[in-house]
Amino acid sequence: MDYEVCRKVWDSQIAAQITIQNRDEILPFYTMLPRFSYFSVVLQDILQFFTSRDNELNLDGEKIWLESKGVPLKMYIPIGVIFDLNNEVEGDTWHIVIKTSNAPSGYRTINRETMEQIYLQNLKEADFLKRKAETIQNMQIDEHRMLWDSICNNHFDDFWGINKKLMDTSDKMFDSIPLRVYERNRPAFKQTLLNPRNDSGELVTVGHAICQLLAISEILPTSTLISHGIRIPAETPLIYAAKNLTYPDNFVHICVLKND
Amino acid sequence: MQDFPEELEDFCGIWKEWKIVKGTVPLENYGKLLKTIEICGEIAILEVNIVYSLIYRVPVLWFAISSENGEPVENGSVEEFLRGCARKMGKLVVAKYSLNEHPVLGLLYYNIHPCSTNREIFKSSSPENSINKIAQWLSNYGPDLGIYIPSGIFF
């Protein structure tokens, strides 16, 4: 693990302006959203801010949903991934609307407790890929809880104090690399089994892994690979990404964006 | 189980209540069943999908339960439904399940955890064992969702 890289990835934030649908008289809420976190985690504080300014405002946390530029925002995908996928311009303020109308079909608002379960399932899946889930099964339930709490409370040191166990390769290299790839025209992310080394023993690169995953022969020069708002060179070793560029669910999340 | 698309086609061809939904590649094809169920006296619609997991290399049951007007039911109702299915099997504990993104639809669905899936079923079968592999698998894991294979159609 490269401490500087992991720390910078953890600390990166997005400036956001949040408004409420059809309530132009209510001043927007401005905040910095941690890229690694989830809307399900930060929403409680945002709603509390609005209701503390206006007692008569009734925002049901289970019914509202989020949208930006007409696109519903998934509450269970890391905030940074949604920002990158929607091709927002880095440095610009992200305009997010809290919608109180009926949510689009299939959209689900997720509270923090449900998000914790989704997070843990993802974490288990990532460790299943890396080492058949042996590490996570040997951890205490309290440690799972501490990982989640450190995300909710933005405690980098607490998180990495435990997460280092899941990242340890001193005894054995990961079997597969947990990578999820997003494209704007696909409703779901893609993932599969990806070895960190090829049959010749060479390190597999991020570019090769994405080609395998998307069943394409090459990354076109008109496409950009983005994670944490950073352009990822296609020649980056996949194992480097898995050790330094993962989100807290232990997956590397990369958006493949086609430049217009 | 690279022959999942063929096995699925065979399975849905025999048990006609299951329909195939085509994905962008054959391994993304999945089987879909809609069934009317009752939870605490209320009528609801159970949608079950058999989706191949590229991670676990086995089929996985994904499901959603909605009320008659199409709204997803509360988590408590889902738990109650699974508890009822477990009781029917004489089990005290419900199957391990959680919400996550459906691998093809990109929407939140519940899934039955594949960690306990018996992978032996999916190893290449001997010529004399020609029973559809998805049917063999579903006979073990379908009851978690109250799905029982009608007698005589596969076995």
Image (spheres, coloured by chain):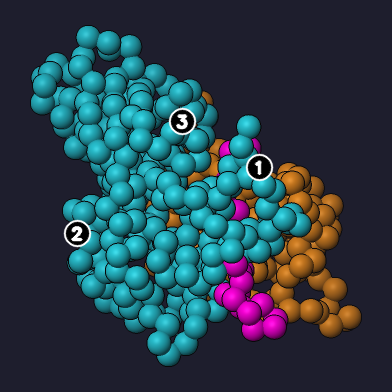
Residue A72: mark: 3
Q: Is residue A63 left or right of residue A77?
A: left
First of labels 1, 3 by sequence position: 3
Q: Which chain is orange?
A: B
Which amino acid type is shown beneath numbered disc 2?
His
Separation of marks 1 and 2 at Cα, in angstroms: 38 Å
Provide the chain ID for the residue under circle 3.
Answer: A
Name the residue rendered at 61%, 72% in the picture. A204
Observer-side mark, 1 or 3, equals 1
Instruction: Please give the residue where the numbered disc 2 appears in the rendered image.
Output: A155
**Relative image position of residue A107 (x, y in whole percent):** 47, 34
Q: Which residues are magenta?
A: A182-205
Dominant SS of magenta comes to loop
Which amino acid type is shown beneath numbered disc 3?
Pro
Query: Where does the N terminus of chain A fall, quadrant-wise?
Result: bottom left
Q: Could you say which is closer to the camera, residue B151 or residue B32?
A: B32
**Relative image position of residue A69 (x, y in whole percent):** 46, 23
Residue A101 seen anywhere in this rendered image of the structure: yes
First of labels 1, 2 by sequence position: 2
Provide the chain ID for the residue under circle 2.
Answer: A
Disc 3 element: strand
Q: Are marks 1 and 2 on the same chain?
A: yes
Name the residue rendered at 32%, 39% in the picture. A14
Q: Could you say which is closer to the camera, residue A105 or residue A235?
A: A235
